[in-house]
Image (cartoon, grey):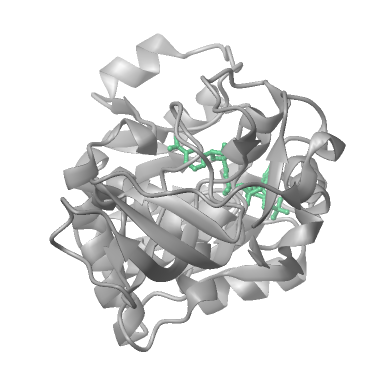
Amino acid sequence: MKAAYIQKPGPADTIIYGDLPDPSPAPNQLLIEVKAVSVNPIDTYIRSGKVAMELPQPFVVGCDFAGVVLQVGCEVQAFRVGDRVWGSNQGLLGRQGTFSEKIAIDAKWAYPMPDKVSFETAAAVALVGITAHLGLFAEAQLRPGQSLFVPGGSGGVGSMVIQMAKIAGARVVTTAGNTDKATRCRALGADAVICYREESIEHGLKAFAPEGVDVWWETLREPDMDLAVASLAPRGCMILMAGREARPAFPVGPFYVKQCQLRGFVMFGASAEQQARCAEQIGHWLSQGDLKPNIDRRLPLAETAQAHQWQADNTVESSGLLAGKIVLTP
Ligand SMILES: NC(=O)c1ccc[n+]([C@@H]2O[C@H](COP(=O)([O-])OP(=O)(O)OC[C@H]3O[C@@H](n4cnc5c(N)ncnc54)[C@H](OP(=O)(O)O)[C@@H]3O)[C@@H](O)[C@H]2O)c1
């Protein structure tokens, strides 16, 4: 089968697109014909070695997938040959990745795809959708009527946070690097968009929520904790989930006097059962049309190295190149 893989961590052009043997499923696994995958920033950190993880040899890159079940391991009850499935959490913690024509994965990481949902859609929302669900509901415990700020509303995570927060009945303000992205953020449901290259985030937030925002969902890799704490409402909650190397100054006094909360999480730290519950609700929202993928561009799987370069430039170098997910098809 064709696969995008590396022999050892390195720059994007380390990725080889070539032939590997087909995987064979263990008793607890499904063999899946992959129809679509999407790139996440973590794929680029693992590929480069910036985030060191145990890697199979060779290592197929990528976490997200959508496809069709070709074969079912003898211990698996929940799926049949021909089922359409989607999921994430591969290519992590020693597991093989998804950027190949076929994958063998533990059935606990596969979710049924509703009939009306396309493979591209499911692949594009996989990791970012589960992340947004975990952060909004298990961590921030968002309630109807609350206000939420998420920077980078046209980004992978930001676009999911906006939509799910709106489904939950919150008021949402975000940022955009240009007017096209601001339009996209409004189409996703944002109540207000701060064009941060022209206007101050601080002023935009004051106008939107004079008493402060109830939830600050940080997506940036270098958070400004002074601004965040100053912009939080009393008893507000800040979510941290990006910026492994960040060591920002922290305003202790203003934070505890306002009785705020700080919650950090990583999606792959949640159990398979917890993620499956998120996936069930995401599948329902997708089938109802309440949640939409935010796809910026599509590429053939053979162009994985290019996709990694673009994703890293966007997320790490803040190039502004992307306005959503890169989806690839074998
Ligand atoms: N903890 C977890 O479980 C978890 C899960 C998923 C992702 N993450 C992390 O979350 C971060 C975001 O991921 P993503 O998939 O959403 O990335 P992304 O698609 O690249 O989106 C990030 C967005 O942030 C905006 N941005 C970049 N630099 C900015 C700046 N200096 N000021 C304001 N906005 C800026 C950009 O939009 P504009 O062009 O509009 O500026 C960009 O589109 C990454 O660091 C990723 O590793 C963590």
Residue in front for this viewpoint, 181 or 64:
64
* Residue drawn at 34 percent across, 68 percent down: 166
Q: Quadrant of the C terminus?
A: bottom right
* 1 relative to 84, above or below: above
Residue in front for this viewpoint, 159 or 327:
327
The image position of residue 103, as x and y in percent, is 48, 53
Residue 170, can we see it? no
Q: Quadrant of the N terminus?
A: bottom right
Residue 150, can we see it? yes
Q: Residue furthest bottom?
A: 116
Relative side of 172 to 225, left or right: left
Residue in front for this viewpoint, 302 or 122:
302
Relative side of 287 to 129, left or right: left
Residue in front for this viewpoint, 208 or 126:
126
Q: Quadrant of residue 81?
A: bottom left
* Residue drawn at 74 percent across, 72 percent down: 180
Ligand 1 location (quadrant): top right
The image position of residue 113, as x and y in percent, is 33, 74
* 312 relative to 24, above or below: above
* Residue drawn at 37 percent across, 89 percent down: 116
Relative side of 53 to 239, left or right: right
* Residue drawn at 53 percent across, 43 percent down: 97
